[in-house]
Amino acid sequence: MFNTGKITETSYTVGLDAERSDASKPTAAGGRSNALRRSSADAVAEQDRRRSSEISPNSRLSRRPTASSSYLQGRDTSQMNFSHFIGIDVSKNKLDVADVEGTLCETVDNTDPGVQQLLKRLPKPGSCLIVLEASGAYEKNIVMHLVAAGHIVSVVNARQVRDFAKALGILAKTDRIDARVIARFGRDVKPRAVAQLRKNQDELSELVTRRRQLIGQRTAEKNRTDTITSSIVVRSLKKHIQHLSKEINRIDGEISKLVKSDDEWRGKFDVIQTVPGVGEVTATTMIAEVPELGELNRQKIAALIGLAPFNRDSGQFKGRRTIFGGRSSVRSVLYMAALSAKKHNPVIHAFAERLEVQGKRPKVIITACMRKLLVILNTMVKNNSPWNPNLDTQNT
């Protein structure tokens, strides 16, 4: 069934000798920050009490048998039985493939012909769990082909796999060793599989990303005009700024056209935009980069984006809670939306004022407003209901 080809690196064997027993194998570290247990107002008001150590929504440890990663989360693999676990180490030009037993050892080109060659070597779809690391979008092509062929695929955080390898005493690192470590990570952790990818999800995400890049370039050019005295350079900067503005407008049109072409996206877009302080940019970013919106509860959606603070306590030491991880691009958009909502949204405005009276620092206040706004958007999308100033997010 598999191509015979043992991994012969001596360093890998040495690493295996250092492994602990099965009983001590580590579980998956949460790829996102810990979630909060209570509502935004109470949680921020009493940061040091009743703080949850809830696992990230990307980890199977917090799942019931019934719910980027930027990939839309699909089937729960923790209750499924697999005959084989296969790891794929992805790079720009090639794919290194290995299974736990070491009987599968393949290297193919990261191209459509190479992927087709690999598909012929894999076991029957559904009988194996295939795990890959997120590799800066180089894994997208192979993931789409595998999912389309019916395979159960999981895309995991590379840091989690590396920490897993270190915990097992596997210090050597080559592409082939990494592929087998990924396979073992899949066997021991069984990370959640990605769902069938939407046809236009990648295109929308790339358009939103490109718009953000162009905005950054235009802002940098505008900042340069404040310090330049040469008239020639100023004309060059203004010409470039005009070109960037035209490109941004063109990208905006393509994003709008793509969102309107999908009934589900259009429905989400219309619902999200009913919130005072939330505009088109925030709405399209949430649709493109948070496909889980409306599918998770308030704790997990906050952890996924990186708006749930980490505890930093040890013994009698009580550290300051800080947010960490998550999706920074989404947080950037929510930050601007929260600034606007503090002025124009009665719920967020009143919430921010309560925190100011309690003596909270400005950064804590704006972060709490971002989280509350995110929870409100999540609830609205989940219920497919427009903005309601009396919306109760306590039990969402």
Image (spheres, rainbow, N blue to C red):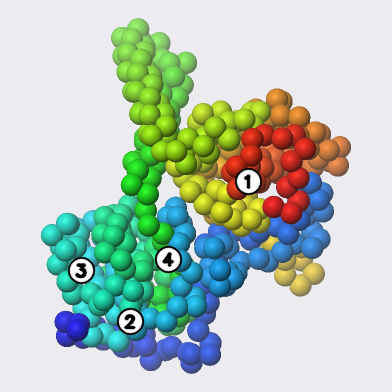
Residue flagged by tag 4: what amino acid is it? Ala
Q: Nearer the viewer, residue 224 or 124?
A: 124
State the image quarter where residue 139 is shown.
bottom left
At a point 45% along the width and 55% down the height, the residue shown is 72
Residue 295 in the image, given as x and y percentages of width and height? 56, 54
Mark 2 or mark 3, which has the lower sequence index? 2
- How crowded pointer 3 is (Cα within 10 Å; few <14, some 14-19, many 20+) is rated as some
Q: Which residue is mark 2?
A: 84
Residue flagged by tag 1: what amino acid is it? Asn
Q: Nearer the viewer, mark 3 or mark 1?
A: 1
Q: Which residue is mark 3?
A: 119
Residue 383 numbered mark, or none: 1
Q: Secondary structure at mark 4?
A: loop
Residue 193 numbered mark, or none: 4
Q: Secondary structure at mark 3?
A: helix
At a point 19% along the width and 62% down the height, the residue shown is 115
At a point 64% along the width and 35% down the height, the residue shown is 386
At a point 53% along the width and 87% down the height, the residue shown is 24
Mark 1 or mark 2, which has the lower sequence index? 2
**Marks 1,2: beta carbons within 8 A:** no
Q: Nearer the viewer, mark 4 or mark 1?
A: 1
Q: Is residue 31 above or below residue 171?
A: above
Mark 4 or mark 2, which has the lower sequence index? 2
Residue 42 in the image, given as x and y percentages of width and height? 81, 50
Report how far apart the C-alphas of labels 2 and 3 lie in the structure: 15 Å
